[in-house]
Amino acid sequence: MLKYKDLNFKALIQRRKPNQSLSPNSSMRQSLTHPHLYAIAYQNRHHHRSALIALYKSKHNPHPLTISLVRANKSSTSTSTPTRSTRTTNTTKKLERITKGFILIPTHSSSSSGSLCFVPKKIMVVIDQHVLWTFFASLFGFVLLYIIRRNNNANNRKLKKKNSPQQRVDNNSFTDGEFRHVNGSDSGTDVIVVGAGVAGAALAYTLGKDGRRVHVIERDLTEPDRIVGELLQPGGYLKLVELGLEDCVEEIDAQRVLGYALFKEGKNTKLSYPLEKFHSDVSGRSFHNGRFIQRMREKAASLSNVKLEQGTITSLLEENKTIRGVQYKTKDGQEHTAYAPLTIVCDGCFSNLRRTLCNPKVDVPSCFVGLVLENCQLPFANHGHVILADPSPILFYPISSTEVRCLVDVPGQKLPSIANGKMAKYLKTMVAPQIPPELHDAFVSAIDKGNIRTMPNRSMPADPHPTPGALLMGDAFNMRHPLTGGGMTVALSDIVVLRDLLKPLRDLNDAASLSRYLESFYTLRKPVASTINTLAGALYKVFSASPDQARKEMRQACFDYLSLGGIFSTGPIALLSGLNPRPLSLVLHFFAVAIYGFGRLLLPFPSPQRLWIGARLIWSAAGIIFPIIKAEGGRQMFFPATVPAYYKAPSVKSDI
């Protein structure tokens, strides 16, 4: 028994079991089924009536305290029966006494006929205060959010008005939301694209699809025959889909690539792309580079506002430090000029126009020697194969249903001569013994056929000179080692960024304003491009053999780290594939490999020599990655929002 002191009457509290009758007396029996009912019985001694106050308190029904008053008649000892008015008056007074300090609330239960519900006034005041403060807090938050949004919108409008090259809206510029014609372009061309490779053809189609009048000038429109640009990573395929060019990998016998297989000293590990969250069609693609480019050229030429012409650019036409167009020679040797408000140079890794638009720092760390292996099966189907050979890696990947491309990396720029047979001898004596047994015979057979090709591997960080009227893109602008096959992914990602920047613009004729506006392009592209560039350069140095013991340990640690599986393999492979191009993730994984290698040296027992090698390993890792990050631009790479040019771009949603 407990005294219920908060109520101004005597009360007894008892726990009622399920289906137990509620009684302080037999005249008040009532069957209730709620398992958490507490009964408070109040006996009115003066009026011989009982009042039952039921307190419902359930963990399943956490509502405010509710009290029901149920009146039960008891046979009176008086022989006289009060009149109706007397009974009403007495009942009212009694209820006033009992409910003092309570607020009357009607009961909605069908079984509560003649019952009343009461809530303590103190509790109701608390509830009112909470509701009141919640209301004012919500109102304040709404007003604050409205003010912030209004200020942001006003700032964005001012910024766009300040940076956009268009100061006047021409109602005839758009038809059904697409760019059609802008007064002021005497040449009839909006954009000149120099080069029709992967970047140039994709850009021409993208701008043409947006309604721009595009003039593409390509040195040679016949099908290219190259030994690089044959592997498109899944991240690049997603960009291809975003640009509407995914059908360009169809009908060219392209092969699906689902990951990589890594080989080292007889051991191997398989690294699959993390494609579980993507559509089943998303994967890497490998193909003949020339077939892929021809498909994109056909796609671009199918648009009526895209003109594709064969010609060799001799110079950029400059006037008052502004590029106005190009001068070129056609196939028959005639000189021509073409003018446009914007000229985009995409003439590849051997560009002769980049010097006026950027500060080229081209490095050639190695060369690829290319072979085609026929009618052979790779150890892991639909996977690229990387052999950590001595002195540098060897690549295998399918380029058709019957052909496998082999790329042998040879450090330096000086190669054995192909003409006098030294190259064939080098491949047979130095390279063939390191090839997996499944591919050895096909490799030797390809050497005997004599179709050996070479290609210098170039890397060049992006270092542009913003020039009114012109822009650099593709390998003419930025290159990385082709070990990771990231070049086409970067180019297609750059095109998506540029498309989103140009889409809101109707007039491109104000070259100075357009140049300032497009400075944001160099910043917006950095996180994706720099991640892929840095990974390519760092992996090549780690995978290459070295006499330094610390570098050997780093190489072995990288192989073992990737062999661990889980996040240790999916994290780096997501970076390599372009599915997760995040610079911070790259740095974390890179130094995780270094720390993993250092930890291995401490087992089973550390020694001064092992500690020294471990320290040099960490130092070597820093010496590999930090110079690459510095060349790429650490601020733009990791903190693009701190670069003023970042805010010159419109707030256009773009997927990574």
Image: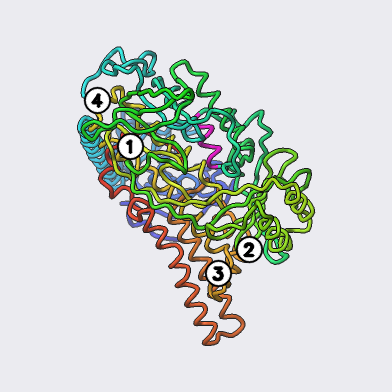
Q: Are marks 2 and 4 in contact (CB under 8 Å)?
A: no
Three-letter amino acid code at disc 1? Leu
Residue assigned mark 1? 104
Mark earlier in primary sequence (2, 1):
1
Image: magenta residue range: 235-243
Mark earlier in primary sequence (3, 1):
1
**In the structure shown, which secondary structural element does the residue marked by tag 4 occupy?**
loop
Q: Residues within 10 Å of mark 2 (few under 14, many from 20)?
A: few
**In the structure shown, which secondary structural element does the residue marked by tag 2 occupy?**
loop
Mark earlier in primary sequence (2, 3):
3
Residue assigned mark 4? 166
Residue found at x 47% / y 29%: 218
Q: Are marks 2 and 1 in contact (CB under 8 Å)?
A: no
Judge depth for marks 1 and 4 and give the one in front.
Answer: 4
Magenta region includes residue 453:
no
Q: Position of residue 394 (x, y in %)?
A: 64, 56
Q: Which mark is residue 564?
A: 2
Residue assigned mark 3? 554
Judge depth for marks 2 and 4 and give the one in front.
Answer: 4
